[in-house]
Amino acid sequence: MADIIQLLSNHISNQIAAGEVIQRPASAVKELMENAIDAGATDIQLVIKNYGSDLIQVIDNGKGMSATDARMSFERHATSKISKVEDLFAIRTMGFRGEALASIAAVTQVELKTRQKDKDIGTRIVIEGTEVKLQEACVTNAGTNIMVKNLFFNVPARRKFLKSPGTELRNIQDEFTRIALAYPEIAFRFWHNGSELFHLDAGSIKTRIIALLGNHYDKKLVPVEEKTDLLNISGFIGKPEAAIRTRGMQFFFVNGRFIRNTYLNHAISTAFDGLIDKTAFPFYVLFFDVDPKHVDVNVHPTKQEVKFEDERMMYSFLLATVRHALARNNIAPSLDFTLNADIQHLASVEKPQTETDRANTQNGYLFNVFSDKNQAHVIERKDSLKQWKTLYEIAKSPISVSPEDANSQHLPLNNSQPSLINTADNSFSTNTGNMLMIHGTMLATTVKSGMMLIHIKRAQERIYYERLQRRYQNKNVPSQQLLFPTSFELAPSDALLLSDILADLSRIGFEISSLGKNTYVIQGVPMDMPAGEENNIINEILDNLKHESTDAFNQRTDKILINIARRVTRYSSNLYQPEEQQALIDELFACSQPEMSTDGKKVFIMIKQDELEKMLD
């Protein structure tokens, strides 16, 4: 029988290796920009065409390469960073394995121009799919100019699996943001299809955060600075009001390299415990300066996962650092066991207690409770029956609520609809007079077969969501014009995302126009949207779409409608009038799916009469 095991050709093995390092255009952007940083560049320019599929160009003013080094840089595992095994434990550069350019060249058409600063002539190299087409001397600026064209031109199956253009561009922006945050001392510029998206001058980390992520972070940053012999932590955390309900505004950097680490993220979440909602995520940009021998960055091809020698120590130190920063800025309480000197001068301390004061204290209720033997646990035992009687009288009396006290922002409902829950057997027929509001959040009503319990907020959310769906399908929906149009400025990445969904928002009644320079104006909103909520709704939609895991158009549209429905109905759970309560039930059961909320939870339950009786057995 013939032998069947054979060595792969260099061409095929390079393409396989490229699949681990270059997964999408953003992967190539990351590798090329990191090479520019390692070259000592102080000015880096990124040029993208058609979301990176047609062109990715990185221009830097670094030290450049000789003709021999330029050619060797495209060979696999050719590197200037490692010469012996011990070098792996002293790495402070971004790249070191010699895989980036070789992987890029395996699946693209590459043109490289480079010149060392002390040379008059540079080198030009053209490579297609690992094959060197041309190498010649050329005139070029000092540094390196590399152009990556037609990504995956020789692997059409990989090109077919790229995400939507908008998603690929946002992935590129994410990589650009991480690198630009890590190196505020370097100037960066970023163009896409001829438009400049970012122009970042060299400066401090705070100015870089504001330039990249938006001016609204200017007043929400808390500085962090702790130094020890083993670890230094610096950067900024956000105040509680900077927390958002989606991930993505959390940045860890270890020795200048962006990393992901859920364990350390838990430390920061613990430090913010009690300061932000449990469903929110704190904002932070934190830098760890660690001796390279205590951290292994060679555990993943993208180098975004690292392994620390002592993660528990890192966790404890980070937790204490963040708590200290919060306390130092009067955001979280800190315990101070030193006695305030002012206390010593209070009248109650300086003046002795008189006999009259002592007698008044001993006659008090609390003194007797805590001084009588075995009575410390007894609280108003003799009056307990009287208290129950008072509660009963309160519960028996009807609650009168004035229109001024009622929440004026409850969901508008169509009162003209006939009751749609009356079925042929009348098992769901309700009596408006037998409705009961429970704690302002649930509505109980009697039906022929027993009782129905409705979660008001979920019902309103379902009603408004399906109303938005109908508007979206009808396309030409009238808008409610704002008397005073509101303008707002977004971070460049958010502005790009908003421009991508403007058509969707227009179909449900929003009128939003661009004023240029990432500034927009809202002139119209959907007809029944509460006043003043338009900016909050847009920001919440963007926060939820930033890191979407899918590119299906219908699912993205669905997320937009769900976000709007949740925001509009967030504070609209009070229905005090019987007519409003009945209208809610009517419109709920007119929905195509009345039993489930937008997040898959039950909107109502039916409790049969025999089940109610069993509860009292």
Image: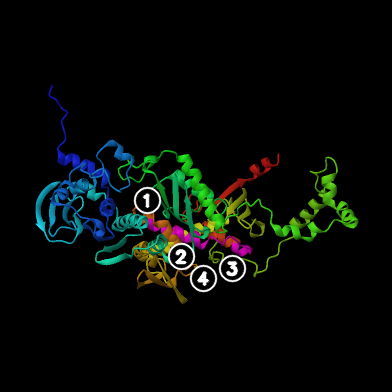
Image marks 4 and 3: residues in contact by CB distance under 8 Å:
no
Give, as a single range, the part of the protein colored magenta. Answer: 556-580
**Residue where numbered disc 2 is placed:** 218
* Depth order, front residue of 534/473: 534
* First-in-chain label (2 vs 3): 2
- Marks 4 and 1, how far apart at CA: 32 Å
* First-in-chain label (4 vs 2): 2
Instruction: Between label 4 and label 3, give the one nearer the viewer.
Output: 4
Instruction: Between label 4 and label 1, give the one nearer the viewer.
Output: 1
* Depth order, front residue of 457/382: 382
Q: Residue 597 at x, y = what percent?
A: 50, 53
Where disc 1 sits, the SS reads: loop
The dot on residue 549 is 1
Q: Residue 172 at x, y = what percent?
A: 30, 56
Few, some or many C-alpha atoms within 10 Å of disc 4 (few <14, some 14-19, many ≥20)? few
Instruction: Between label 2 and label 3, give the one nearer the viewer.
Output: 2
- Marks 4 and 3, how far apart at CA: 11 Å
- Marks 2 and 1, how far apart at CA: 29 Å
Instruction: Between label 2 and label 1, give the one nearer the viewer.
Output: 2
Tag 3: amino acid: Ser
**Residue where numbered disc 3 is placed:** 408
Q: Residue 493 at x, y = what percent?
A: 36, 61
**In this rendering, would 222 be left or right of 136?**
right
Where disc 2 sits, the SS reads: loop
- Marks 2 and 3, how far apart at CA: 34 Å
